[in-house]
Image: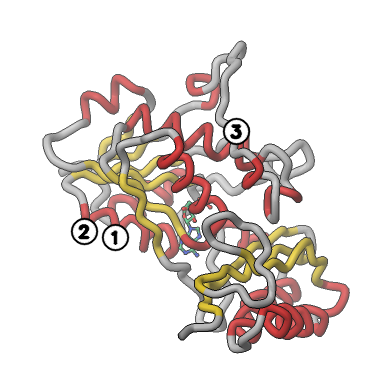
Amino acid sequence: MDLIVARGRDDLVKARRAGTVALVPTMGALHEGHRSLIRQARVRADQVVVSIFVNPLQFGPNEDFSRYPRTFDADLEVCREEGVDVVFHPAADDLYAADRQVSVSAGEMGRVVEGAFRPGHFDGVLTIVLKLFNLVQPDLAVFGQKDAQQLALIRRMVADLDLPIEILGAPTVREPDGLALSSRNRYLSDGDRQVAVTLSRALRAGAARFTPAEIRQTARAVLDEAGPGLDLDYLALVDPATFAEVSEGYEGLAVLAVAAKVGSTRLIDNVTLTLNPA
Ligand code: AMP
């Protein structure tokens, strides 16, 4: 079946087939990480919808909205190769009325860790995701663990607002040397690229230790070795459900998350680990 490009609600309604629908929300510039999400959706649903929309609401005034990569034709090709049924590619003006008033608040959990460096970011993410859920009406939706706080907040939104949608988390796809794939990696110069791998190296080194203090210290030491080419925003060891920092003695799953600017590019990464396994 040919790939359908939908621009609005009417197109989506027309494209709808019987059976389960999976949504994979993206901002385009699709890479292997996105492909892995699409494949997970393909296995679970009769119809796969990929949304491609660079959401202005989730970018701060000094962030990279205008220079975010837009590669729509190449993205369509990726979607064709992966057997996607519908690409939803709305125009910002159609999605957001000039006089809109109501949006979703991510609450306190949206103001910590990544949210502390990007005020309003998660409100913007949850608002677009809820709008996409309402427009596409999927049975399930797939998100990457690469954006761990986003995934956790989407799970909270689904629980707190009683949304009838199953959320699937997909593992982070990495380059052979460990760098997490990101649409923003294309901004990295050769020199930046060498430095960027420090993020995943630091997370791996930290995850090999056992107590919160050791984990933080070890990861921090690796980040420090990178020198001035790496401008750290945060290194955080948090409870995956709340994104609150964990204390000594914490038991169970934790997320070790990092964000840093490498050159002019801001990168994030994280790993999940288990503390004090019995
Ligand atoms: P984005 O286009 O960056 O908004 O990402 C769209 C979806 O792809 C989100 O759910 C991301 O978490 C996910 N994603 C981005 N990079 C990766 C990756 N390297 N591995 C797996 N999923 C990813």
Q: Position of residue 121 (x, y in %)?
A: 65, 41
- Label 2 sits on residue: 43
- Residue at image position (37%, 23%) is 8
Q: Is residue 193 left or right of residue 124?
A: right
Residue 39 tag number: 1
Amino acid type assigned to the residue bearing label 2 in the image: Val
C-alpha distance separating marks 3 and 1: 31 Å
Taking the view exactly as shown, the residue that stands out farthest to the left is 18
Amino acid type assigned to the residue bearing label 1 in the image: Arg
| CB atoms of marks 3 and 1 within 8 Å | no
Disc 3 or disc 2, which is closer to the eye? Answer: 3
Amino acid type assigned to the residue bearing label 3 in the image: Ser
Disc 3 or disc 1, which is closer to the eye? Answer: 3
C-alpha distance separating marks 1 and 2: 6 Å
Q: Position of residue 143 (x, y in %)?
A: 42, 53
Dot 3, crowdedness within 10 Å: few (<14), some or many (≥20)? Answer: some
- Residue at image position (33%, 55%) is 38
C-alpha distance separating marks 3 and 2: 32 Å
| CB atoms of marks 1 and 2 within 8 Å | yes
Taking the view exactly as shown, the residue that stands out farthest to the top is 99
Residue 194 appears in the picture as rendered = no
Lower position in the chain sequence, tag 3 or tag 1: 1
Mark 1 Cβ inside 8 Å of ligand 1:
no
| CB atoms of marks 3 and 2 within 8 Å | no
Asked where in the image residue 262 lies, by quadrant, the reply is: bottom right
- Label 3 sits on residue: 105
Asked where in the image residue 102 lies, by quadrant, the reply is: top right
Q: Position of residue 15 (x, y in %)?
A: 22, 30
Q: What element carries label 1?
A: helix
Q: Is residue 258 left or right of residue 133?
A: right
Residue 277 tag number: none
Q: What element carries label 2?
A: helix
